[in-house]
Image: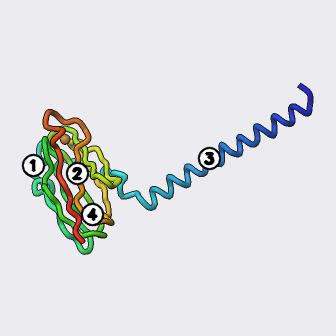
Amino acid sequence: MNHEEHAVIERFERGWLVFGVGMIVVFVVLIAYTMANFGGSIPVGTERVDATKVRTEGQFANPRLEQVGEEYVAYVQAFAFGYAPGEMRVKRGRKVTFYVTSPDVQHGFMIERTNINVQVIPGEVARVSHTFKEAGEYTIICNEYCGLGHAGMISKIVVEE
Ligand SMILES: [Cu+2]
């Protein structure tokens, strides 16, 4: 290989190195942007609970949707094979924070047409939040296999104007 060819390869390599580093920067910026603006749909494990006492003690023994100031807080039990509370109704444009746990096996908590999609593990509380920007009915779906009733494990959240 003569000197000229060598220089060409160096330029070519440098170009790809710059491109590679540039892509890493782009990805880091995109991830940071997503976390800053859409971080609510990233589940936060807030606490541990005794799965055998979920139905009888603590916040989840009284599953509910509560209005707290301008926002909502929901304590949700995902059980085989349903959700409590059942249908939830909220106003459009208000932030809803869901705390979800299971008294039995693993479940999923996915709300269609949103980024809410979390695993519900017995013994753990998953926290996610979402602001519904459009009124309508949103189906909540269990997307983690939990037994024979799994396919019918659905609920809904109604967003009103
Ligand atoms: Cu399930």
Ligand 1 is located in which of the four quadrants? top left
- Tell me whether the residue at label 2 lies in contact with that at label 3, contact meaning CB atoms closer than 8 angstroms: no
Q: Which residue is outermost to the right?
A: 3
- Residue 50 occupies quadrant: top left
Assign the C terminus to one quadrant of the image. Answer: bottom left
Q: Which residue is outermost to the front?
A: 136
Sequence-earlier tag: 1 or 2 = 1
| Kind of residue at disc 4 | Val
Residue that carries the numbered disc 2 in the rendered image: 140
- Tell me whether the residue at label 4 lies in contact with that at label 1, contact meaning CB atoms closer than 8 angstroms: no
Residue that carries the numbered disc 4 in the rendered image: 96
Between the C-alphas of marks 4 and 2, the distance is: 14 Å
Residue occupying image coordinates x 13% and y 55%: 86
Between the C-alphas of marks 2 and 3, the distance is: 36 Å
- Tell me whether the residue at label 4 lies in contact with that at label 2, contact meaning CB atoms closer than 8 angstroms: no
| Kind of residue at disc 2 | Ile
Q: Secondary structure at mark 4?
A: strand
Q: Mark 2 or mark 3: which is in front?
A: 2
Q: Position of residue 81 (x, y in %)?
A: 13, 42
- Tell me whether the residue at label 3 lies in contact with that at label 4, contact meaning CB atoms closer than 8 angstroms: no
| Disc 1 crowd, CA 10 A, few/some/many (<14, 14-19, 20+) | some
Residue occupying image coordinates x 16% and y 44%: 153
| Disc 3 crowd, CA 10 A, few/some/many (<14, 14-19, 20+) | few
| Disc 2 crowd, CA 10 A, few/some/many (<14, 14-19, 20+) | many
Residue occupying image coordinates x 45% and y 56%: 35
Between the C-alphas of marks 3 and 4, the distance is: 35 Å
Q: Is mark 3 within 8 Å of ligand 1?
A: no
Residue that carries the numbered disc 1 in the rendered image: 55
Residue occupying image coordinates x 18% and y 57%: 75
User: Looking at the image, is 1 positioned above or below residue 146?
Assistant: above
**Residue 23's mark?**
3
